[in-house]
Amino acid sequence: MHRLVSLLLASLLVSLVAVPAFAQSAQVARGDALERVLEDASSMAPLRTVVVARDGVLVAERAYRGASTTRPANIKSASKTVMSALVGIAIERGLLEGVDQPIAPLLADRLPRDPDPRLAQITIGHLLSMQAGLQSTSGRGYGRWVAQPDWVRAALAQPFVDAPGGGMIYSTGSTHLLSAVLARVGGKPVRTLAQEWLGPQAGFAIASWDTDPQGLHFGGNQMAMTPRALLAFGELYRNHGRAASGAQLVPASWIAQSWVPRTRSIHTGDGYGYGWFVRQIGGHDVRFAWGHGGQMLYIVPSLNLTVAMTSDETTVAGTGHLVDLHRLMARIIQSQSG
């Protein structure tokens, strides 16, 4: 009897020791696999940095071709995702009524003299999901738009090419209108609001942010962050809006809303929510922010994985670099799935 009890106790002790050892071995294997992936990524000419966090812990970072993970990079349209967070916070604080609130009364003094009646139907949610119906101010329309003396007026004066709430029309003018709305209801420059509302997240900071001719911060472009700061922003979303300190900065309900696809890109077929693209990568549901040239922020909730990538911002769309970045992300996911 005593021998049987001794054997059982010995078996239990072995199992208690073996589990942590196995877990540690798996962690080392994942780390080695990830390092090999990041080493191979050096062949991607436009790529500049990759930063990876798992379960809230920085597990790898790599910089290529003289870049640095602590030097600010222009995250381009990934700033639209930051704008979405600010809108969600403004709603939670009662500064905005919600996503169904019409924007025309908030920007009444910037409307055209003889406004199209459909402007009254555009809501905060339509701007967030790129469903305003207005002609795009991105792509071929971008240069003409930013050459105007008043970008807000020019965005509101675009002709309608679809009904509000219709198909996705990717347009930086839409998120610039959100910047105008936030500055008005918040009573401060939008960069100041961002630092006050998101600044408590450890590591988050906006290094610089261009403004329009009226001094309004550019709602959907020209925001500079270090790759580590971009990762810190992603970690805030990965952690359901809670900062590393435990403070709730972004409402968890807003994050859930933002990740629900409301329309679809005609170029990639990816779903689009409130400032976030949605697609499957490596067999997992992934939410990502995307800036011109390959400025990326990926979140894989099922793996508690957050990845920030920056690239040469002059990389031309259509070169296949975005596809390469998604493939790199698939390999990162594979390295962490074991």
Image (cartoon, rainbow, N blue to C red):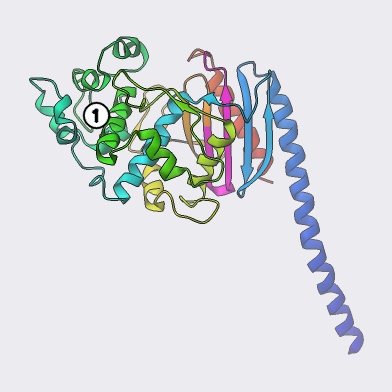
Please name the residue that numbered disc 1 is placed on: 132
State the count of labels. Answer: 1
* Residue at the (13%, 32%) spot, across then down: 120
Residue extending furthest left? 114
* Residue at the (44%, 39%) spot, across then down: 195
Quadrant hosting residue 63: top right
State the image coordinates of residue 125 (x, y, percent, origin top left).
27, 38
* 265 within the magenta span: no
State the image coordinates of residue 253 (x, y, percent, origin top left).
37, 52
- Callout 1: helix, strand or loop? loop
* Residue at the (70%, 30%) spot, across then down: 38
For residue 230, side relative to residue 104 (left or right): right
Q: Which residues are magenta?
A: 297-314
Residue type at the position of mark 1: Ala
State the image coordinates of residue 163 (x, y, percent, origin top left).
18, 28
For residue 50, side relative to residue 250 (left or right): right
State the image coordinates of residue 246 (x, y, percent, origin top left).
51, 56
For residue 152, side relative to residue 71 (left or right): left
For residue 220, side relative to residue 64 (left or right): left
Instruction: Tell me, yes or no, if residue 275 can be seen here.
Output: no
Residue 277 or 295: which is nearer the viewer?
295
285 lies above or below 156: below
234 lies above or below 323: below
* 313 within the magenta span: yes
Quadrant hosting residue 67: top right
**Which secondary structure class fits the magenta region best?**
strand
